[in-house]
Image: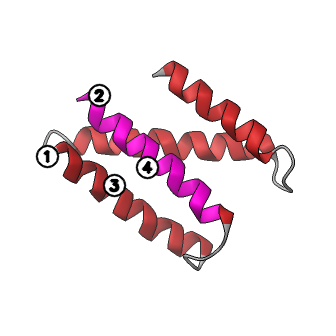
Amino acid sequence: MRVLILVCLLMSMNQFAEAAIDPYQEAIDQTAHFTVGAVISYGLSFYMPPVSAAFTVIGAAYAREVIQHGSPTDGDGIKRDMLYWTIGAFVGVNLH
């Protein structure tokens, strides 16, 4: 688990180093998306099938990101955030 979080951090720093985004803030943001997705899907997997738990988290995360970014076609912002939500959701259900 720690290795996966480290890989996500390294990917974030490398991927956003050339963008106009602060790479350290982006690493914290994406780590938070991953962690919250994993924790919520892990908890839900005790009450519903693991795949349903993962997709419930992904659906709720998508709704949250659309509200935050204002449009599902916002560009890379929502796609990047959803990538980490999705990874976290599937890691969380695999911990159960």
Q: Earlier in the sequence, mark 1 or mark 4?
A: 1
Q: Earlier in the sequence, mark 2 or mark 3?
A: 3
Three-letter amino acid code at the position of disc 2: Leu
The local crowd at label 1, few if under 14, some if 14 to 19, many if 20 or more residues have their Cα within 10 Å, is few
From the image, tell me which residue sits under label 4. 86
Q: Residue placed at 64% from the left, 74% from the top?
A: 74
Q: Position of residue 70 (x, y in %)?
A: 59, 79
Q: Position of residue 90 (x, y in %)?
A: 35, 41
Residue 22 image label: none
How far apart marks 1 and 4 lie (CA) works out to 16 Å
How far apart marks 2 and 3 lie (CA) works out to 15 Å
Q: Earlier in the sequence, mark 4 or mark 2?
A: 4
Q: Earlier in the sequence, mark 3 or mark 4?
A: 3
The local crowd at label 4, few if under 14, some if 14 to 19, many if 20 or more residues have their Cα within 10 Å, is many
Looking at the image, do the residues carrying marks 2 and 3 touch, with CB atoms under 8 Å apart?
Answer: no
Q: Nearer the viewer, mark 3 or mark 4?
A: 4
Three-letter amino acid code at the position of disc 3: Val
Looking at the image, do the residues carrying marks 3 and 4 touch, with CB atoms under 8 Å apart?
Answer: no
From the image, tell me which residue sits under label 1. 49
The local crowd at label 2, few if under 14, some if 14 to 19, many if 20 or more residues have their Cα within 10 Å, is few
Q: Image check: 76 left or right of 68?
A: right
In the image, is residue 64 above or below residue 30?
below
- Region in magenta: 77-96
Three-letter amino acid code at the position of disc 4: Thr
From the image, tell me which residue sits under label 3. 57
From the image, tell me which residue sits under label 2. 95
The local crowd at label 3, few if under 14, some if 14 to 19, many if 20 or more residues have their Cα within 10 Å, is many
In the image, is residue 38 above or below residue 86?
above
Label 2 SS: helix
Q: Residue placed at 25% from the left, 40% from the top?
A: 43
